[in-house]
Amino acid sequence: MAEDEAVRIGRLRWPLILATRQQAAQIGATGIDESLTNLQRIYGDVQPVGALTFWGTNGTVQQIDEAQVTHRIFVRWTDALLNSEVFVRISKRVNQTDRMEIFRVRRLKELGGRKRFVCAECQMERIGDPWPIQ
């Protein structure tokens, strides 16, 4: 289904964090340490793309079919988002614990041709309990 090109400002009412992902090799180990820096609080609208099949373990989520885009995130205009940047959405579960979702930016699309809004096509990378944001 085609997305409505006319975005209204009231639609962007959900708090998000736009962050840059920093990755470095672990000292004395073979893994990667990951942290989120350059945090910016913004407001946007997160919409799933459609019916998709997921498989996940240990807090990671992997899409089984070919498409890499799982969600569209609508925000105010920003010049460029790199694939090292992520959107973070933190919400409350029924038991009042935090639930964090991390969305990796895949593609950008300007809406309406006026540089007011942008649609970021994203892939949900992680879902689960919050981990340290630096």
Image: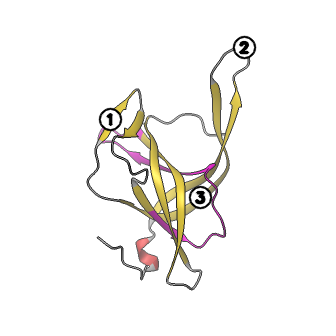
Q: Read off the magenta span.
A: 73-98
Amino acid on which the number 2 mark rests in the picture: Gly
Q: Residue furthest top?
A: 28
Give the vertical position of 30 relative to 131 (above or below). Answer: above
- The residue where tag 1 is placed is 55
Q: Secondary structure at mark 1?
A: strand
Q: Residue at x 33, y 45 (%)?
A: 65
- In the rendered image, which quarter contains the C terminus? top right
Q: Which mark is residue 41?
A: 3
Q: What x and y, as percent, mark residue 54?
A: 31, 40
Question: Do residues under tags 3 and 2 come within 8 Å of each other at their CB atoms?
Answer: no
Q: Secondary structure at mark 3?
A: strand
Label 3 to label 2: alpha-carbon separation: 35 Å
- The residue where tag 2 is placed is 28
Question: Do residues under tags 1 and 2 come within 8 Å of each other at their CB atoms?
Answer: no
Amino acid on which the number 3 mark rests in the picture: Arg
